[in-house]
Image (spheres, rainbow, N blue to C red):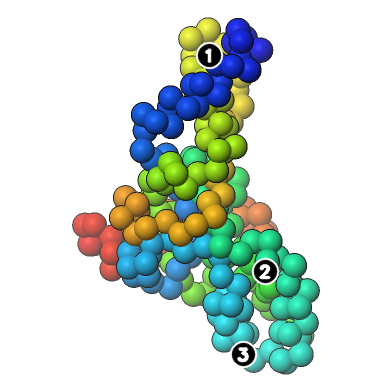
């Protein structure tokens, strides 16, 4: 922001005007739901460890109970720090390239629980079991501005000004200006504007560097195949 005179004053003022002009910020949410129906009925709901743990117990019902309880206990610190939060990205292309693990495995919390189980007595990597349920999905979401914390709104203002400056001076910095959002409240269903099922996602948890998704349509896709 050094190029911008009086940027200490200008940036907050720009942010304020931008936030009163626009009603929503566009973002994308990566997930792997068993059905999209709850999203269209209840919207996006903040992280709820109780339902994640319930799914963990049913998905790994064949594992000794003591091992499951040990994993749950080790993750307890995140149960409170992440409660009620929803993570979104400002750029879906960047999400697919750099942090698409929510799309491949579903909830990061569930992935971490599975990782705590280690590797099975055979050679089963328990984390890969998460890839056998659900459908890899990217939701396009218009987040109401009131739900976005002020610091994240300021980051958007800085990004817009920075991009504008780079374009205006024809001096691209060549770095990603993608933003992440952490929203601490539920996002209503009407804010979900579209969705799709990506065919390829960069995979950091597998020896194959690209995850290939063969389920490209669901019952809520328009138009249906
Ligand atoms: Zn679909």
Q: How much space separates mark 1 and mark 3, taking CA atoms?
A: 55 Å
* Residue located at (66% from left, 12% from top): 2
Instruction: Determine the image quadrant of residue 179.
Output: top right
Q: In this orientation, does residue 92 appear?
A: no
Element under disc 2 = helix
Quickly name the residue at label 2.
79
Quickly name the residue at label 3.
61
Q: Nearer the viewer, mark 3 or mark 2?
A: 2
The quadrant of the image that shows the C terminus is bottom left
* Residue located at (47% from left, 27% from top): 16
Q: Is residue 124 above or below residue 186?
A: below
Element under disc 1 = helix
202 and 43: which one is in front?
Answer: 43
Q: Are marks 3 and 2 in contact (CB under 8 Å)?
A: no
Which comes before the other along the chain, label 3 or label 2?
A: 3
Q: Nearer the viewer, mark 1 or mark 3?
A: 1
Quickly name the residue at label 1.
165
Q: Nearer the viewer, mark 2 or mark 1?
A: 2
Q: Is residue 79 above or below residue 9?
A: below
């Amino acid at each position: 922001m050094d190029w911008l005179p009086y940027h200490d004053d200008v940036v907050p003022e720009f942010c304020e005007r931008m936030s009163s002009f626009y009603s929503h910020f566009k973002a994308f949410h990566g997930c792997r739901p068993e059905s999209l129906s709850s999203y269209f009925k209840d919207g996006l709901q903040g992280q709820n460890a109780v339902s994640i743990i319930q799914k963990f117990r049913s998905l790994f019902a064949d594992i000794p109970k003591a091992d499951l309880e040990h994993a749950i206990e080790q993750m307890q610190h995140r149960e409170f720090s992440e409660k009620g939060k929803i993570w979104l990205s400002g750029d879906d292309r960047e999400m697919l390239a750099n942090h698409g693990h929510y799309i491949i495995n579903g909830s990061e919390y569930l992935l971490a629980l599975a990782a705590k189980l280690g590797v099975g007595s055979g050679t089963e990597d328990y984390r890969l079991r998460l890839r056998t349920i659900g459908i890899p999905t990217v939701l396009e979401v218009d987040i109401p501005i009131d739900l976005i914390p002020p610091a994240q709104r300021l980051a958007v203002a800085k990004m817009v000004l920075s991009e504008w400056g780079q374009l205006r001076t024809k001096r691209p910095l060549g770095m990603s200006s993608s933003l992440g959002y952490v929203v601490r409240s539920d996002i209503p269903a009407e804010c979900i504007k579209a969705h799709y099922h990506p065919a390829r996602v960069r995979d950091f948890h597998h020896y194959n560097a690209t995850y290939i998704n063969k389920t490209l349509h669901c019952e809520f896709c328009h138009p249906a195949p």
